[in-house]
C-alpha cells in the first residue's frame, strides 16, 4: 500500500514536471520559429506569434506564466498603447471612418511587442533568439545573392526586375523594400556576433550574406539607414570603433561600387534627375493633407484616398503611402499621433543600452539597428510594412529587456574605475559566454 502511494506521488510529480516543461518549451519553440522565419514567410512568422500569444494567455490563466502588470512595462511600451489609442481616435474623426477602421487591422503588429515582452524574459532565450534571427536572415541573404545573378524568385516562380549589372533581390518576401527592411536591423546583430561571439567565422559569413542581400535589394533608403546605423554603432563603442567602422564602411562602399557599377548608379540616382524628385512630391503632398487635418489627422489609410485632391503635379510610380514613416503618421493621426510616435522612441533611447557602463557590441548593435530603421523610415514606410515592423519590434523589445533586467535594482558588480573596467570586460564577453551556454 505504501509503495502504491509513493508511486502515485512520483507519478504526480512527473506529470507536474512535464506540464512545467511544456510551459517553458512551447514559448521557446515558438519564439525560435518566429526568429528563423521572419526573413522568409510572414504567414509562418505571424502564425508563431499568434500561437505564442495563445500559449502565454493560457499559461497566465492557469498560473504557469508570471503575471505581467502595467507598472512592469517600460515607458516605450506604455507609449505604444497611447499611440494605438490615438490611431483608434482618428478613425471616427477621419475623413473615411470605414476605410480607416479596415486599415486599423494592420496595426495589430503593434501588439506584438507585448507578446515578445512576456516571452523574452529569459536572457538565454534572447541570446538564442538573436542567433536564430541571424541564421534565418543569412539564408535569406544568400537567396537574394542568387536572385541577383539568376534573375528568378523560385518560390513564387517569377522573373525579377533587371538593372544594369544584375537583378533586384526580393528574397521570399515579394518586394525588395520589405526584403531590405527585414535584413537591415538583423545585419547589425550579425555584425555584433561576428565581432564577439564564439564560432566567429560562421557569424562573419552570415553578416557577409546579409550585407550582400541588403545591397542587391537596391533599396536606397535602407542603404542610408545602414550607413547611419554603422556610424551610431561606432559612436556607441567609442572613438576607435567609430574610426574603424567609418573607414571600413568607406572601403566597402568603394569596393562594391567598383565591382558592381549598378550599385553606384542606383545610389547616385537619388542626386540626379530633372525637376522635383518623386519622393519629394509625395512628401509635399503629405504636408498639404496634414495642413487641412492638423491635430488628429485624416484617419488611417487616408493618404491613398485623398492623394488626387492634394497631389503635387508630376509622374508617380506608387501613391499608396507617403514613403516616410513620420509623414505617414502625421497624415493619419496628426500632430497628436506624431508626438505619441516620437515619444515612443525618445523613451526607448532614454533607457541605457544595458546595465550602467555596458559596452558590449550586442547592446550597441541593438540600438544601432533601431536607428537604422528610423533613418531608413524617413524615406520609406517601414513601420506600416508588417514584414518589417514585426522584426523591428522584436529587436526593440530585446534591447528593452536587456536594459530593463539590469536597470531594476540590480546591484553594481564593481565600484569605482576598476569596477567599471571589470564590468565593461564582462559585458564584452557576454555574447561569447551566451553562445557557450547553448
Image (spheres, rainbow, N blue to C red):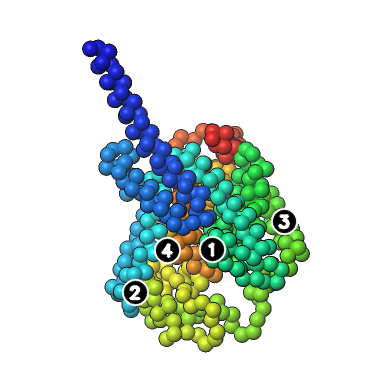
Mark-to-mark CA distance, 2 and 3: 49 Å
Q: Which residue is mark 1?
A: 156
Residue topped by disc 4: 341
From the viewer's perspective, is the residue at label 1 or at label 2 nearer?
A: 1
Q: Residue at x 48, y 81 (%)?
A: 285
Q: CA distance from mark 3 to mark 4?
A: 34 Å
Judged from the image, the secondary structure of the residue bearing numbered disc 2 is helix
Q: Are marks 4 and 2 in contact (CB under 8 Å)?
A: no
Instruction: Looking at the image, tell me whether mark 3 or mark 1 is earlier in sequence order.
Output: 1
Q: Which mark is residue 99?
A: 2
Q: Residue at x 31, y 21 (%)?
A: 10
Badge 1: residue crowd in 10 Å (few <14, some 14–19, many ≥20):
few
- What residue occupies the far left of the structure in this picture? 1
Compute the Cα span from label 4 to label 2.
22 Å
Q: Which residue is mark 3?
A: 247
- Residue 386, given in percent of the width and then of the height, sits at 45, 61
Amino acid at each position: 500500500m505504501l509503495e502504491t502511494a509513493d508511486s502515485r506521488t512520483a507519478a504526480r510529480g512527473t506529470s507536474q514536471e512535464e506540464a512545467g516543461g511544456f510551459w517553458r518549451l512551447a514559448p521557446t519553440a515558438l519564439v525560435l520559429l518566429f526568429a528563423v522565419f521572419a526573413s522568409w514567410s510572414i504567414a509562418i512568422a505571424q502564425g508563431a506569434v499568434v500561437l505564442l500569444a495563445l500559449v502565454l494567455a493560457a499559461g497566465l490563466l492557469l498560473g504557469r506564466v508570471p503575471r505581467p502588470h502595467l507598472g512592469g512595462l517600460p515607458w516605450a511600451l506604455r507609449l505604444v498603447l497611447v499611440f494605438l489609442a490615438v490611431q483608434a481616435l482618428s478613425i471616427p474623426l477621419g475623413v473615411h471612418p470605414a476605410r480607416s477602421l479596415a486599415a486599423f487591422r494592420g496595426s495589430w503588429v503593434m501588439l506584438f511587442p507585448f507578446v515578445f515582452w512576456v516571452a523574452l524574459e529569459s536572457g538565454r532565450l534572447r541570446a538564442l533568439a538573436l542567433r536564430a534571427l541571424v541564421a534565418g536572415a543569412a539564408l535569406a541573404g544568400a537567396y537574394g545573392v542568387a536572385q541577383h545573378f539568376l534573375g528568378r524568385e523560385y518560390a513564387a516562380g517569377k522573373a525579377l526586375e533587371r538593372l544594369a549589372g544584375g537583378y533586384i533581390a526580393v528574397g521570399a518576401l515579394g518586394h525588395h523594400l520589405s526584403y531590405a527592411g527585414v535584413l537591415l536591423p538583423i545585419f547589425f546583430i550579425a555584425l555584433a556576433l561576428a565581432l564577439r561571439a564564439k564560432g566567429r567565422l560562421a557569424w562573419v559569413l552570415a553578416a557577409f550574406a546579409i550585407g550582400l542581400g541588403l545591397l542587391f535589394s537596391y533599396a536606397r533608403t535602407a542603404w542610408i539607414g545602414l550607413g547611419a546605423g554603422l556610424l551610431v554603432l561606432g559612436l556607441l563603442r567609442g572613438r576607435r570603433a567609430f574610426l574603424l567602422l567609418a573607414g571600413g564602411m568607406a572601403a566597402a562602399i568603394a569596393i562594391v561600387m567598383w565591382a558592381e557599377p549598378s550599385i553606384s548608379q542606383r545610389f547616385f540616382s537619388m542626386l540626379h534627375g530633372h525637376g522635383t524628385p518623386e519622393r519629394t512630391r509625395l512628401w509635399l503632398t503629405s504636408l498639404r493633407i496634414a495642413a487641412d487635418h492638423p491635430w488628429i489627422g485624416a484617419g488611417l489609410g487616408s493618404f491613398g484616398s485623398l492623394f488626387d485632391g492634394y497631389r503635387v503635379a508630376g509622374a508617380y510610380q506608387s501613391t499608396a503611402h507617403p514613403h516616410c514613416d513620420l509623414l505617414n503618421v502625421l497624415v493619419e493621426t496628426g500632430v497628436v499621433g506624431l508626438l505619441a510616435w516620437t515619444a515612443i522612441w525618445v523613451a526607448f533611447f532614454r533607457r541605457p543600452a544595458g546595465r550602467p557602463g555596458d559596452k558590449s557590441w550586442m547592446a550597441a548593435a541593438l540600438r544601432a539597428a533601431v536607428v537604422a530603421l528610423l533613418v531608413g523610415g524617413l524615406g520609406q514606410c517601414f513601420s506600416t510594412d508588417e514584414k518589417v515592423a514585426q522584426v523591428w519590434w522584436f529587436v526593440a523589445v530585446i534591447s528593452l529587456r536587456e536594459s530593463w533586467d539590469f536597470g531594476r535594482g540590480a546591484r553594481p558588480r564593481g565600484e569605482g574605475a576598476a569596477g567599471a573596467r571589470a564590468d565593461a570586460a564582462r559585458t564584452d564577453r557576454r555574447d561569447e559566454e551566451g553562445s557557450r551556454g547553448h
